[in-house]
Image (cartoon, helix red, strand yellow):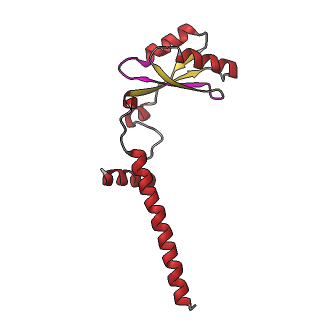
Amino acid sequence: MTYKKKLFKATIWIFSIFSILALVLVIHIAMVTKPNNSHHSNWQLSRIDFTQSLDSAQAQLAMKTIQSISGVKHAYVNNAQGTLVYSYEAGHLKSADVFDAFIAKTNFEAKPYKAPKMEDATGCPVIDKSSLTYRFTTFVQNTLR
């Protein structure tokens, strides 16, 4: 084969692979971001910070206690950081009420997490709205709607 034919064939392969990967990415974004009919839209996340890290027995006790509170849906304990994150349905419970009930049932030294003003004002502190990933995902979402 001549050099031009090899270059043309390689270019076709590279373009085909890139097109397939781009199509898979767009389909994935469309599937992940489409609205569903679950009842998760009303859930609120809150966090409790413990003054020290927890051992596994304390973590299990914290999980059992927080999940025993009526209205709490899910919970996660990070032993090393000493945090407990839980979800509940907004409007039926308040974070302060859940915290008070948790403290009343346990003898842990803890405090409710308060978001810094900047995070509280902008929403999720993890998302960088100027990133290429965020802008591309938003573009695909808006295009498919």
Image quarter of residue 38: top left
Q: Quadrant of the N terminus?
A: bottom right
**In magenta stretch: residue 81:** yes
Q: Write the start and end of the magenta stretch as one range.
A: 80-95
Q: Residue furthest bottom?
A: 2
Q: Residue at x 60, y 14 (%)?
A: 109
The front one of 29 and 125 is 29
Q: As displayed, is residue 1 above or below residue 106?
A: below
Q: As displayed, is residue 93 above or below residue 23?
A: above
Q: Residue at x 64, y 20 (%)?
A: 60
Is residue 130 visible in the rendered image? The answer is no
Q: How many marks?
A: 0
Q: Residue furthest left?
A: 145
Q: Residue at x 52, y 87 (%)?
A: 5
The front one of 85 and 127 is 85
Image quarter of residue 58: top right
Q: Residue at x 69, y 18 (%)?
A: 57
Q: Position of residue 49 (x, y in %)?
A: 56, 22
The front one of 71 and 104 is 71
Q: As displayed, is residue 142 above or below residue 44?
A: below
Q: Is residue 140 left or right of residue 57?
A: left
Q: As displayed, is residue 135 above or below residue 59?
A: below
Q: Is residue 131 left or right of residue 81?
A: left
Q: Position of residue 118 (x, y in %)?
A: 42, 35
Q: Position of residue 53 (x, y in %)?
A: 66, 24
Is residue 143 visible in the rendered image? The answer is yes
Q: Position of residue 88 (x, y in %)?
A: 44, 22
Q: Residue furthest top?
A: 104
